[in-house]
């Protein structure tokens, strides 16, 4: 009976979070909040998936992940601003030009922060592999340094994040007002989830990385430099944080040096709820957090952050290792 409860309880929680607000919210408002919650969830997934990927495969508690998120937002901001100045694509009436400049800015942010992640892994993380306590101390220090570097390079003040013209405004779908950008964020987030899942589960590269987690010595004997693969995983996790930072900044339309510290709390909750190392867990946990936060923020604004912590407590009391502990 206890096993059956643990098996079905998370499913009831998911259904309850998704459907129970219909009893308290009008259908039109419910649809609007649901789309916004799904968008927030997908953006949190991008940040949490990078953190979960690094911890799940490298057993590294990288609390500097939030700073990498912030660097992604600022680099994306600069890349978009410069490319828009040269091409004018951001203010063009062409949706294809708008999508092109947005994706290029995200790619630039992802690549540059991946390089920053590699440097961080080589200089900061590698000396403390295997010691979570030292990892916490050293990555908190790295986060502080990276935030101060942002203030030196871009200044301490908030910046307004530019948004492509086609991404602004909303659509009226069956008399329901739906903002454009949240739908775009949902689509991009889902595509990235499918790409990451496919690489980890269906390719030789993913097999080597997963095998290296279980038995690094055996992988080394087979002729693979497992630490090179681990550096690659860290780079990918950093790039995901950067892409999440750029997309989140476009969502909230502003950036500031400490924004990573605010979002990393949600990312940690999402990664723990889903099961560390699990991409499917990260996306499900992120959607649960995004939806519950938006519903409660509308009904009882002061309890919005509290419902996220309550969700974490309930899930862990039922499944201490998260929804998908197998790392699927």
Image (cartoon, rainbow, N blue to C red):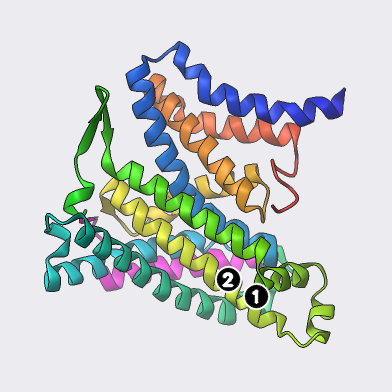
Label 1: how many Cα within 10 Å (few below 14, some 14–19, many 20+):
some
The residue under label 2 is: 234
Identify which residue, 87 or 311, lies in the foreground: 87
Give the alpha-carbon distance from disc 1 to disc 2, as whole Å: 6 Å
* Residue at the outermost bottom position: 223
- Magenta-highlighted stretch: main secondary structure? helix
User: Measured from the top left, where is residue 33 in percent x and y?
Assistant: 37, 28
Q: Find residue 186 and report its horizontal and vertical position in percent.
A: 41, 45
Q: What secondary structure is found at the residue carrying circle 2?
A: helix
Please identify the quarter of the rendering in which residue 5 is found.
top right
**Marks 1,2: beta carbons within 8 A:** yes
Question: Secondary structure beneath disc 1?
Answer: helix
* Quadrant location of the N terminus in the rendered image: top right
Q: Position of residue 187 (x, y in %)?
A: 41, 48
Q: Give the range drawn in magenta.
A: 135-162
* Mark 1 lies on residue: 230
Residue 81 in percent (x, y) is at 19, 66
Q: In the picture shown, does residue 252 fall above or below 12?
A: below
Picture quadrant of residue 258: bottom left
């Amino acid at each position: 009976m206890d096993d059956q409860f643990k098996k079905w309880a998370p499913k009831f929680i998911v259904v309850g979070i998704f459907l129970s607000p219909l009893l308290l919210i009008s259908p039109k408002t419910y649809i609007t909040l649901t789309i916004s919650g799904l968008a927030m969830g997908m953006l949190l997934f991008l940040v949490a998936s990078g953190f979960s990927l690094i911890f799940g495969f490298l057993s590294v508690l990288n609390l500097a992940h939030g700073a990498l998120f912030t660097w992604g937002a600022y680099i994306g901001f600069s890349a978009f601003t410069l490319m828009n100045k040269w091409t004018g694509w951001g203010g063009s009436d062409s949706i294809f030009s708008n999508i092109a400049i947005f994706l290029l800015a995200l790619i630039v942010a992802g690549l540059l922060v991946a390089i920053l992640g590699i440097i961080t892994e080589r200089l900061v993380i590698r000396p403390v592999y295997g010691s979570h306590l030292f990892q916490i101390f050293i990555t908190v220090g790295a986060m502080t340094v990276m935030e101060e570097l942002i203030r030196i390079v871009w200044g301490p003040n908030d910046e307004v994040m530019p948004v492509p013209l086609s991404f602004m405004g909303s659509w009226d779908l069956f008399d329901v007002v739906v903002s454009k950008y949240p739908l775009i964020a949902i689509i991009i987030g889902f595509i990235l989830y499918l790409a990451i899942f496919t690489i980890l589960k269906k390719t030789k590269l993913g097999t080597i990385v997963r095998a290296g987690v279980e038995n690094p010595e055996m992988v080394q004997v087979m002729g693979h430099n497992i630490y090179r693969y681990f550096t690659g995983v860290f780079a990918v996790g950093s790039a995901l944080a950067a892409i999440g930072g750029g997309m989140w900044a476009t969502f909230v339309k502003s950036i500031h040096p400490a924004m990573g510290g605010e979002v990393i709390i949600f990312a940690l909750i999402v990664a723990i709820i889903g099961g560390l190392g699990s991409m499917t867990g990260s996306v499900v946990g992120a959607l649960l957090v995004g939806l519950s936060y938006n519903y409660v923020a509308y009904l009882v604004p002061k309890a919005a952050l509290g419902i996220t912590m309550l969700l974490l407590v309930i899930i862990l009391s039922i499944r201490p290792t998260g929804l998908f502990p197998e790392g699927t």
